[in-house]
Image (spheres, rainbow, N blue to C red):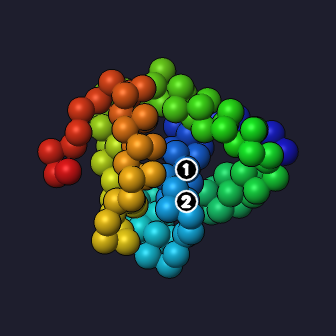
Amino acid sequence: MSFELNNEKATDVLIWWVEGADGSIDYREEKAVGDVLEDVSYSLETFYQETMMYLGGLSNENLKKLVENAIEWGSQHFDEHRKKQTIALLYVIAECNGKITDEQQEKIDKIKESFGVEEPEDF
């Protein structure tokens, strides 16, 4: 299956990376992902049927490469507004369990640094 990054798929990969940072993905996180994707007019179907199916078939090494590629894609292709919006959306997903874990914060910080954006005002 071909998996070429675009704005939606790069965002999907970053969501998956941050969402799973705490070691599990529960109902609240799944609901938050659905809400976030709907807010940015991305397809939940694409997230599950294309992105998640593709990720499920990758080795750990290839997953790491894909995450790095998605961060780089966003850094190079997202405009300033989309970069800030993506960071804010990742915070919403990470916070849906009541607390952002250290692992989630580290991942978001890495993305923020690559994107060259500051902390959203709400966080």
Residue closer to the observer: 47 or 93: 93
Percent across and percent down for residue 109 are 37, 38
Q: Looking at the picture, which amino acid does disc 1 mark? A: Trp
Q: Element at badge 1?
A: helix
Is residue 1 visible in the rendered image? The answer is yes
Q: Which residue is drawn at the image coordinates 52% and 37% (left, top)?
A: 7
Residue neighbourhood size for the residue with mark 1, other residues' Cα within 10 Å, grouped as few (<14), some (14–19), many (≥20): some
Picture quadrant of residue 1: top right
> Can you say whether 103 is above or below 81 in the image?
below
> Can you say whether 10 is above or below 25 in the image?
above
Q: Which residue is mark 1?
A: 17
Residue closer to the observer: 101 or 37: 101
Residue with the most extreme bottom position: 27
* Residue 65 relative to residue 41: left or right: right
Q: Looking at the picture, which amino acid does disc 2 mark? A: Gly
Residue with the most extreme right position: 1
The number of callouts visible is 2
Q: Which residue is drawn at the image coordinates 70% and 42% (left, top)?
A: 63
Is residue 86 visible in the rendered image? The answer is no
Picture quadrant of residue 68: top right
Q: Which residue is drawn at the image coordinates 48% and 21% (left, top)?
A: 76
Q: Element at badge 2?
A: helix
Percent across and percent down for residue 37 are 46, 58
Q: Which residue is mark 2?
A: 20
Residue neighbourhood size for the residue with mark 2, other residues' Cα within 10 Å, grouped as few (<14), some (14–19), many (≥20): some
Residue with the most extreme top position: 76
Is disc 1 in contact with disc 2, using a CB cutoff of under 8 Å?
A: yes
Q: Which residue is drawn at the image coordinates 23% and 39% (left, top)?
A: 119
> Can you say whether 80 is above or below 7 in the image?
above
Q: CA separation, marks 1 and 2? A: 6 Å
Picture quadrant of residue 62: top right
* Residue 8 relative to residue 5: left or right: left
